[in-house]
Amino acid sequence: MRIDIISVLPELLESPFSHSIMKRAQTKGMLEVHVHQLRQWAVNEYGQVDDYQYGGGAGMVMMCEPLANAIEHLQNERKYDEIIYMTPDGKRFDQQTANRLSLYENLLIICGHYKGIDERIRQHFVTLEISIGDYVLSGGELAAAVVVDAIGRIIPGVLNDETSALTDSFQDNLLAPPVYTRPANFRGWEVPPILLSGDPKKIEQWRYEQAVARTTERRPDLE
Ligand code: 6GU
């Protein structure tokens, strides 16, 4: 998969994909992330990409022309399966959406800033609007990093058995059960004996019950 990202703060998106599983996905050639500075398509020599909003009001709006030119430049190179706009008024991101997006070849992500982007870009180019939750960030970059991470780690072949996504929280609308590692007794705090029993059937049953109990307690909305 290739993901292109349009941003006025590309520096924010350098580090998140350079470590651990995201790094492995790219080293293995399964994921490419390309970040593009929107100011390359600025309307003047000052690098302007935003302007005051019609109708008045505080806050700048990202202009049509730089965004349209950036998007069309990238579209000339390849066809995008989705053109995604990161915005707090988008559809709330979830595992189901991550799963669907992980199957595509080419995604384009637009990061908003200030009051957001001109509505006409949303109408004429954007095919999917994503929010990562009900709170406001100062720009779309950190939200885009969340989405790319969630997608990248489940691209087929990125995870091995040890890091398998199959047992993640949310993969079947259940939170994950508690996990433990050595030692079996730390300061008198014991690992549940069933996990030391060596009985895979019982252990699986216990994990399932824990997952259900945790979901009922913490996230009744998931059930
Ligand atoms: Cl996608 N962008 C911004 N600026 N804030 C957010 C968000 C996105 N998702 C939640 N809050």
Image (cartoon, rainbow, N blue to C red):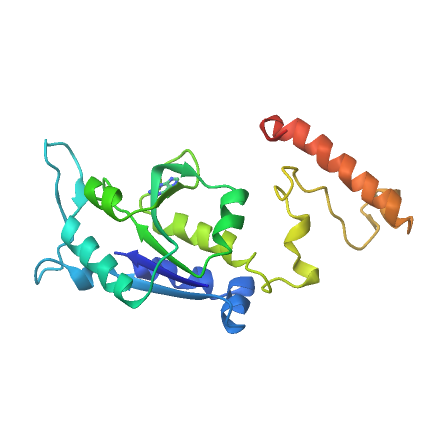
Q: Residue at x 62, y 62 (%)?
A: 159
Q: Residue at x 58, y 64 (%)?
A: 158
In the image, taking residue 70 as reference, residue 103 lies left or right, namely right
- Answer with the quarter of the image where residue 131 lies: top left
Can residue 118 be seen from the camera position used here?
A: no
Q: Is residue 209 above or below residue 10?
A: above
User: Which one is nearer the viewer's eye here, 128 or 33?
Assistant: 128
In the image, taking residue 3 as reference, residue 220 lies left or right, namely right
User: Which one is nearer the viewer's eye here, 159 or 124?
Assistant: 124
Quarter of the rendered structure image containing ligand 1:
top left
User: Which one is nearer the viewer's eye here, 213 or 80?
Assistant: 80
- Answer with the quarter of the image where residue 91 lies: top left
Q: Position of residue 9 (x, y in %)?
A: 29, 57
- Answer with the quarter of the image where residue 92 lies: top left
Q: Is residue 216 above or below residue 91?
A: above
Q: Position of residue 24 (x, y in %)?
A: 55, 68
Q: How many marks on residues?
A: 0
Q: Is residue 162 above or below residue 114?
A: below
User: Which one is nearer the viewer's eye here, 151 or 11?
Assistant: 151
User: Which residue ends up furthest to the left in the rendered image?
Assistant: 44
Q: Residue at x 62, y 26 (%)?
A: 220
Q: Position of residue 124 (x, y in %)?
A: 23, 46
Can residue 127 be seen from the camera position used here?
A: yes
In the image, taking residue 83 as reference, residue 124 lies left or right, namely left
Q: Position of residue 145 (x, y in %)?
A: 42, 54
In the image, taking residue 77 as reference, residue 13 lies left or right, namely right
The quadrant of the image that shows the C terminus is top right
